Amino acid sequence: METKDFLNYLELALKNLHATEAMHFNIRGEVSRLLKLYSVEEVNEKLNKK
């Protein structure tokens, strides 16, 4: 899935959850930053660390 498509899904989820515009902006920005910074494997490793 392309980044643009993923962010569209994210935007729809935030809309369905009635998130504020500020939350939309902050979450979209953070997800975009993480997509550029980490690979899928790195994200999974970070999430599985406890």
Image: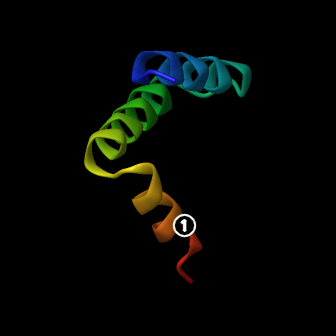
Q: Is residue 48 above or below residue 36?
A: below
Looking at the image, which residue sits at the far bottom?
50
Kindly identify the residue that appears in the image at 48 percent across and 27 percent down.
24
Most foreground residue, 23 or 9: 9
Three-letter residue code for mark 1? Leu
> Is 5 positioned to the left or the right of 16 in the image?
left
Residue bearing the label numbered 1: 47
> Is 8 positioned to the left or the right of 31 in the image?
right
Q: Is residue 1 above or below residue 40?
A: above
Query: Residue 30 in the image: x percent, y percent?
Result: 36, 41
Q: Is residue 38 above or below residue 31?
A: below
Viewport quadrant of the C terminus: bottom right
Could you classify mark 1 by the number of other residues whose Cα lies within 10 Å: few (under 14), some (14-19), or many (20 or more)?
few
In what element is the residue under mark 1? helix
Kindly identify the residue that appears in the image at 63 percent across and 17 percent down.
12
Q: Quadrant of residue 27?
A: top left
Query: Residue 36 in the image: x percent, y percent?
Result: 27, 40
Query: Residue 41 in the image: x percent, y percent?
Result: 45, 58
Most foreground residue, 49 or 2: 2
Query: Residue 46 in the image: x percent, y percent?
Result: 46, 69
Kindly identify the residue that appears in the image at 60 percent across and 20 percent down.
9
